[in-house]
Image: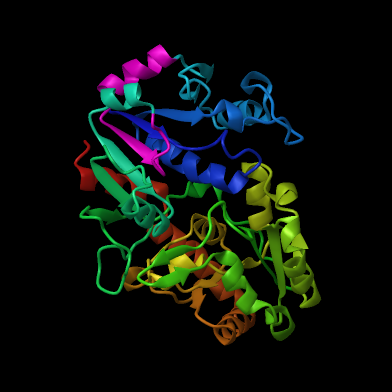
Amino acid sequence: MITLLVAGALANKPLNGGEAWVRLAWALGFQRLGLNVHFVEQLAADHCADAGGRHAPPQTSANLAWFKRIVRHFGLQDKATLLLDDGTTLAGPSREALSEAASYAAALFNVSGHLTDPDLLDKIRRKVYVDVDPGFTQLWAAAGDGNLAGHDDFLTVGTNIGTPGCSIPTLGLHWRPVLPPVLLDQWTPTDSAEAPLRFTTVARWRSAFGPIEHEGRRLGLKVHEFRKLLELPSRVPVTCELALDIDAADQGDLEALRANGWAVVDPRAVSKDPLAFRDYVRGSSGELSAAQGVYVDTRSGWFSDRTAHYLAAGRPAVVQDTGLRGELAPGRGLVTFKTLEGAIDALTGIASDYDAHRAAAREFAERHLDSDRVLANVLDQLGIK
């Protein structure tokens, strides 16, 4: 049986159900294809906190409790190891067992280059970087602040990288496009939403990193794109809702959103774990979201893992245009916009033919996002058999 390692952040992102699905889809998706999969995560002691956000020892932290709860729920408790940066095992199989698996694993799939432990990396014959932040990843690396070194293969959800029209540098690397895999049987659509239609998303107003300079331009964040849509709720026949992580320093933006008719809810309440996130998505009529300016302005062809889950749940998505084309060209079920007027037209159009868009959303997911297809294709491209 082929053994793979998957590395990514769960404990590092406690109470973030949407992010958990991203990492789980790679680990569980490969497992469903009949592979022997070990999940591994590194956690810095100074990143550990209790449920109230106060610094805590790793052994009593909310990070550890979250990790244990998630891997147990999805049956990975005997195949998932949480390590401290000093190599101490906090949960799951021992470091020794993990090292043994690393020595005979066919490959490591390193989501965002999360695993940096040199001893483990030295044991792994093939290391695959999985890029989920296209543009940021490459531009940071170009500035000497990346973690691409030592990897053999490179996957990205920036489906246009390396093609004409996309300004993201390849850095001389071959970036293979990959769509976010979704565990479709975990996202079976529920009953159709009833009127009034409610379009939602889960978002951070500002990311952990600031705008980035590229080719003489300043590429902005999601906050800058959403500000262009402030008046949208008053001009469409649907409710517009944001589960928004927004800092107190941006109180002015929060007040402006509410004054313009946006419903704003606490993301910690609606996406506190994978099941809550799924319930929130299924309880919505569809997704409405802007994108990071980096994804938009570089024409990255970025495909959002969050959007992937809305589509899988049979919820049509109205999202900002990042340059999707070819088989991924927007249409029924997945509609993109470039301007406020475009967003108005998209939401109005979906509202007038909602059931057809709802069915098309799930069909898109079955055709393009099914983890069985996505990950089998990855293995085939990489020659892992």
Q: How many marks?
A: 0
Above-or-below relation of 310 to 154: below
Q: Is residue 6 visible?
A: yes
Q: Which residues are magenta?
A: 95-116
104 part of magenta stretch: yes
Residue 155 is situated, as x and y percent measured from the top left of the image, at 31, 50
Residue visible at 42% across and 56% down in the picture: 136
**Quadrant in which residue 100 is drawn:** top left
Quadrant in which the N terminus appears: top left
In the foreground, 355 or 343: 343
How does the figure colour the protein chain or chains?
rainbow
In the foreground, 126 or 285: 126
Residue 249 is situated, as x and y percent measured from the top left of the image, at 73, 59
**Quadrant in which residue 313 is drawn:** bottom right
Residue 163 is situated, as x and y percent measured from the top left of the image, at 25, 68
Residue 213 is situated, as x and y percent measured from the top left of the image, at 42, 65
In the foreground, 145 or 197: 145
122 part of magenta stretch: no
Quadrant in which the C terminus appears: top left
Residue visible at 54% across and 29% down in the picture: 44
Residue visible at 33% across and 69% down in the picture: 327
Above-or-below relation of 372 to 189: above
Q: Is residue 373 visible?
A: no
Q: Say whether residue 115 is left or right of residue 188.
A: left
In the foreground, 364 or 85: 85
Q: Say whether residue 166 is left or right of residue 191.
A: left
Above-or-below relation of 1 to 145: above
